[in-house]
Image (cartoon, rainbow, N blue to C red):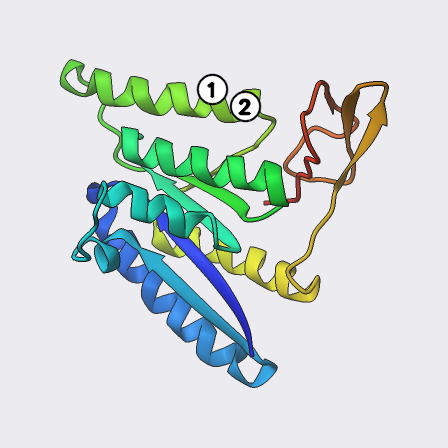
Amino acid sequence: MKKIKIFLASSAALKAEREQFEIQIYRKCKQWFDRGIFLHLDIWEDLSARMSGTRSQDEYNHIIKQVDLFVLLAHTRVGIYTSEEFEQAFGQFQSTQKPFIYTYFKQSDIPTDRAHRQQLQSLWAFQDKLEELGHFYSNYQDFNDLWNQFNKELDRLETDNFVETKAVAQKTGTNKIVNIQNSKNVVNTSQIGNVGGDFIIGDR
């Protein structure tokens, strides 16, 4: 049995999406059981009751370093802990080429009044960071749209045996240059210079 570990990061405001996501992952797990694939999902509600000698967030970060897929959902804000979870996942990806990282932003019912300005600024700043990293995020309108997108990603990964390599690091002197090719979510032929270690970007 091949165990695929997934971590779902999101703010408290997206509880309904997390609950529906958990249901759909369980159904997908049943569909794939005869193929020898088991999907294991971690969400912060499942972990928050555990006693920790350090911060609870440190426990989440430890789990993130061991997962195969990291999924981030956001709507009107990206809080400090959600941002920290992304940093953990991205740092691990730079070191080990795992986890695959997926980011989805809900587009419906976004408030634009002054009271929500600070929240929206955290959202926009995080999106700017993703663009600087060459990571093209996805938008969704409702849960059905979200699951339709992510379910296709799961099927694509299963076809590729959960291994994707769309960018190859080439050593150039003391630095490494990453050439991006054949990726629908990263600008083709773009490069990232001065990479400290192997850095591979796969389709989201």
**Three-letter amino acid code at the position of disc 1:** Asp
Q: Is residue 20 left or right of residue 6?
A: left
- Picture coordinates of residue 182 (x, y %)? 77, 40
| Residue 103 in the image: above or below residue 19 | above
Q: Residue furthest bottom?
A: 34
- At x 64%, y 44%, the residue is 203
Question: What is the quadrant of residue 26 in the picture?
Answer: bottom left
| Residue 150 in the image: above or below residue 199 | below
- At x 50%, y 79%, the residue is 31
Circle 1 sits in a helix, a strand or a loop, which is it?
helix
| Residue 36 in the image: above or below residue 48 | below
Report which residue position mark 1 lands on. 128
Q: Is residue 5 left or right of residue 21?
A: right
- At x 54%, y 23%, the residue is 131
Circle 2 sits in a helix, a strand or a loop, which is it?
helix
- Picture coordinates of residue 75 (x, y %)? 31, 35
Marks 2 & 1, CB-CB < 8 Å contact: yes
- Picture coordinates of residue 125 (x, y %)? 39, 18
**Three-letter amino acid code at the position of disc 2:** Glu
- Picture coordinates of residue 118 (x, y %)? 22, 17
- Residue 77 visible here: no
Report which residue position mark 2 lands on. 131
Circle 2 crowding by C-alpha within 10 Å: few under 14, some 14–19, many from 20: few
Question: What is the quadrant of residue 152 in the picture?
Answer: bottom right
